[in-house]
């Protein structure tokens, strides 16, 4: 029995026994190689679940949307390792209760889908350690290093050009499982911190704020990057922020579900070489 | 740079240490550059990175953020939290090409009036050398000309 069939029947069992109220997985998409989130509430609906190498979206986004978990019932969700990382962050930030989530874990390597052992977040403690030591994608690393070598005016020009494309659709925010604020700072208009029209200055500010709010909270799932309709390389900024918290505070976001959020904690001997 | 350039510097300071330090500089009759505009806040923990962006948006050439030395925070830990935040924000600004020399951080205690005066003089001098932050200010100008039609 393949992993898809195994997970389908397990999902149907969970739904028919009433253990979970909903299974969030993947269904057929608009083209043959696209997958769309599927929300199965009955055993019959779970027959439509698909699991293959095209299931790349991070479905944790849906756990924090619209008060889904406020009734205390359980939800099952299909997650890749980066999804498990972001679930760890959400639990650490008290947005999700660990016991409310049943995980159907899977990994995609060389177009092969393999199951991940365990159904509860506590079963994935080893995975966090493994992800911490994994090397980031070389393409991202190289591009970030190329930018670092440019000098500040070169980088400014680069980002000015990138951000000038931004149309302020906020798709990056909507796609991100960590952007769960009920009222986002860009929607605050008294005071108006970030200009709302999509000129380059406002775009600059929005993208800086977005990146800062995700510093030490990003699971590097790439959802923002894929969602961007004008292809701003958000992965580079996210990578740079992740690198900073790792180097300065020895912190890896989403390593475990009980870590203290990096910007909500401190050590007395944190580095401060830049402070006069 | 032309000699007539007088930089605008915005200083976000905490009320318990750096503001008191600035006050001491004043009562001690220490002279320092008049280019700084001080914004007093309850604690460095209250200083949001948004303030820095807003100051730049409104035409600041340099920004100073200053508070109590570690261990001296009136609220016990506000400056420790702020320190982590600045570390990360500074890296972000550097990565997006906003020169690090324009955003300064310091600890100035209530007893360090002289340090405050020296610091402001030093930042003013260095910002004069750097010149106006035209890179960023041009973005703001672009909006103003756009909205005029």
Image: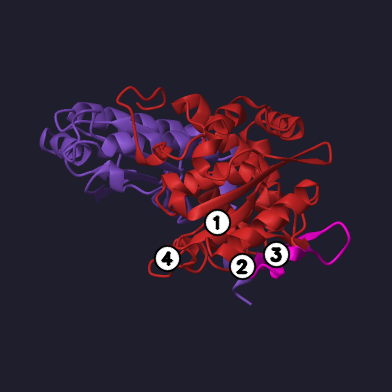
Q: Is residue B114 above or below residue A46?
A: above
Q: Secondary structure at mark 3?
A: helix
Residue B96: x and y in percent read: 60, 41
Q: CA distance from mark 1 to mark 2?
A: 21 Å
* Residue under numbered circle 2: B145
Check if residue B51 falls in the magenta segment: no
Which chain is home to disc 4? Answer: A
Q: With respect to residue B114, does A227 lie above or below?
A: below
- Checking the image for residue A206, the label placed there is 1
Give the mark nearer the N terminus: 4 vs 1: 4
Q: Marks 1 and 3, how far apart in space? A: 39 Å
**Is the residue at mark 1 from the same chain as the one at mark 2?**
no
**Which mark is drawn over residue A70?**
4
- Indicate the colour of chain B: purple
Front disc: 2 or 3: 3
Q: Are marks 4 and 1 in contact (CB under 8 Å)?
A: no
Report helix, strand or loop for mark 2: helix
Which residue is label 3 attached to?
A46
Q: Please provide the residue range marked out in magenta.
A: A28-48
Q: Residues within 10 Å of mark 1 (few under 14, many from 20)?
A: many
Q: Residue furthest bottom?
A: B149
Q: CA distance from mark 4 to mark 1?
A: 30 Å
Question: Is residue B96 among what the camera can see?
Answer: no
């Amino acid at each position: 029995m393949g992993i898809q069939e195994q997970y389908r029947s397990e999902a149907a069992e969970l739904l028919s026994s009433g253990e979970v109220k909903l299974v969030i997985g993947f269904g057929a998409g608009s083209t043959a190689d696209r997958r769309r989130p599927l929300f199965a509430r009955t055993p019959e609906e779970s027959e439509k679940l698909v699991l293959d190498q095209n299931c790349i979206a991070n479905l944790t986004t849906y756990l924090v949307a619209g008060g889904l978990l406020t009734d205390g019932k359980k939800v099952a969700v299909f997650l890749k390792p980066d999804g498990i990382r972001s679930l760890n962050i959400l639990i650490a930030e008290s947005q999700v209760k660990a016991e409310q989530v049943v995980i159907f874990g899977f990994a995609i390597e060389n177009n092969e889908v393999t199951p991940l052992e365990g159904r509860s977040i506590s079963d994935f403690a080893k995975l966090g350690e493994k992800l911490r030591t994994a090397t980031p994608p070389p393409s991202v690393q190289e591009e970030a290093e190329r930018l670092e070598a440019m000098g500040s005016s070169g980088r400014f020009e680069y980002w000015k050009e990138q951000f000038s494309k931004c149309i302020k659709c906020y798709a990056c925010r909507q796609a991100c499982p960590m952007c769960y604020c009920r009222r986002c700072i860009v929607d605050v208009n008294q005071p108006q911190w970030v200009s709302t029209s999509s000129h380059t200055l406002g775009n600059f500010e929005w993208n800086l704020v977005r990146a800062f709010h995700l510093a030490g909270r990003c699971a590097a799932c790439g959802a923002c990057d894929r969602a961007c309709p004008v292809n701003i390389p958000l992965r580079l900024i996210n990578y740079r922020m992740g690198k900073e918290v790792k180097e300065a505070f020895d912190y890896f976001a989403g390593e475990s579900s009980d870590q203290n959020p990096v910007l909500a904690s401190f050590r007395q001997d944190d580095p401060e070489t830049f402070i006069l | 740079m032309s000699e007539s350039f007088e930089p605008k510097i915005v200083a976000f300071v905490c009320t318990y240490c750096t503001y008191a330090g600035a006050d001491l500089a004043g009562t001690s009759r220490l002279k320092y550059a008049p280019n700084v505009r001080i914004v007093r806040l309850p604690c460095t923990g209250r200083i949001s990175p948004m303030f820095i962006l807003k100051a730049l948006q409104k035409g600041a050439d340099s920004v100073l953020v200053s508070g109590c030395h570690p261990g001296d925070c009136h609220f016990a830990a506000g400056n420790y939290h702020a320190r982590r935040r600045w570390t990360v924000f500074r890296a972000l600004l550097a990565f997006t090409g906003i020169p690090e020399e324009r955003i300064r951080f310091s600890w100035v205690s209530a007893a360090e009036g002289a340090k405050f005066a020296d610091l402001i003089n030093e930042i003013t001098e260095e910002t004069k050398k750097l010149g106006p932050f035209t890179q960023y200010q041009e973005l703001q100008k672009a909006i103003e000309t756009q909205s005029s039609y």
